[in-house]
Image: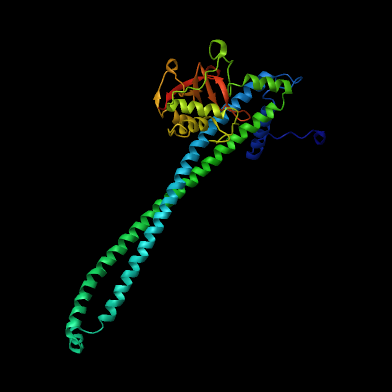
Amino acid sequence: MASHRKPRQRPLTGGPARAAATLALAGAATATAFEGTSQADPRPTPAQVKSEVDRLYEEAEAATEQYNGAKEQADEAERALTGLREETARKTDQLNTARSALGTLAASQYRSGSLGTTVRLALASDPQEYLSQASFIARAGDRNAAGITTVRRRLDEVGKLREKAAGRLADLRSRQDEISGHKAVIEEKLTAAKNLLARLTAEERAAYEAQSSGGPASAPAAPAAPGGSTPPPPSDGSRAARAVAFAYTAIGKPYVWGATGPGSFDCSGLTQAAWRSAGVSLPRTTYTQINAGRRVSRDQLAPGDLVFFYSGVTHVGLYIGNGQMVHAPRPGSTVRLAPIDSMPWAGASRPA
C-alpha cells in the first residue's frame, strides 16, 4: 500500500524557493492592488485610478526636484572640473618653462665650469672679459637655485590641482549616478500612471483631466475670487510685475520634467525662468526656492510671490493675485492658471 501513496510535498524552505514564493506573492499583490476582494470586476473605478495616478504624479514630481538638485550639483562640479583642468594646464606650461630655463642654466654652467678659475684666467686672451663672465656665472648660480625653487613650487601647484580635479571628477560621477537613479524613479512613476490612465474610457480620462487642472493630486477647486476673475498682469514695472508677465507668456507651454524653458518647463523651472527674466537669480529646486526670499503668510500674498505645496515642498507656482497662480502642473499638461486652494498649502516666499 505504501507504494501507492502520494509523495508528501516538501515545504519551501531553501533560499531560492523562499525568494520565488516571495516574488509570486508580490506579483499577486500588485495584480490585485485595485481589484479589492471581488473577482467579478477587476477593473478599478475611476476614483481609484485618479487617487493612484495623483499619488504617482506627486511622487514623480518629488523625484523630479531631487533630479533637478542633483543635476545642478553635477553642473557645478563639471564647471569646477573644467576650471581646474584649465588651471592645471596653465601651471603645467609654467612648470615646463621653469624646467627648460633651469636646464639651460645648468648646461651653461657645466660648459663654463670645466676648467678651474685660475687656469681659465691665465688662458684667457682678455682677462677682463673673463672676470665679467665669472661674475655672470656666479649670478647664474644664484638664479639656478631660484630656478630649482620655482620648479619645486610649480610641481607642488600642479600636484595639488590634479588632486582637486580628481576629487571633483569623483563628485561629478557621484552626482551623475544620483541623476540616473532619480531619472529611473521618475520614468517608472510616469509609466505606471500612463498605464493606469489607459484603463479609463475616453470620457473618464477627460473627466480626470478636468478635475486635475489645478495640479497633481488636486483637491476640489475653490473659486479664485468672487466671480472667478483672472487678474491682469501688474504693470508697475517692478521686478515682481516682470516675473508675472513672463509667467503669463508661458501659459500653454508643455510641462517637461527637468525643463527650464523657453519651450517647456517643470514647476520650479518656470518660477526660476520667470524671476530670471526680472533680473533675479533663484536656485533650481522647490526646496531651495522656498528659502530664497522673505517668507510671507498666506494673507500677505502679492503678485510675484512663490507659492509652495505639499508637505515635502515638492510643487511651486507663481502667485498672480485674486487667489490664483500660474504653474506647470505635471507631465502631460501645460503651464496654466489655477487656484492656490487646489493643492495642500506649504508656504510662500517673496524673492524681491
The N terminus appears in which quarter of the rendering? top right
Does residue 281 lie above or below 171 as drawn?
Answer: above
Figure quadrant of residue 47: top right
Residue 138 locus on image (x, y percent):
20, 74
Residue 246 locus on image (x, y percent):
51, 29
The C terminus appears in which quarter of the rendering? top left
For the question of whether residue 98 can be seen, the reply is yes
- Towards the viewer: 297 or 252: 252
Q: Is residue 129 left or right of residue 258?
A: left
Looking at the picture, the colour scheme in use is rainbow
Does residue 271 lie above or below 113 as drawn?
Answer: above
Does residue 74 lie above or below 38 as drawn?
Answer: below
Figure quadrant of residue 118: bottom left
For the question of whether residue 36 can be seen, the reply is no
Q: At 52% from the left edge and 44% from the top edge, which residue is drawn?
A: 176
Q: Is residue 84 left or right of residue 226?
A: left
- Towards the viewer: 124 or 77: 124
Residue 23 locus on image (x, y percent):
66, 34
Residue 265 locus on image (x, y percent):
56, 33
- Towards the viewer: 181 or 116: 116
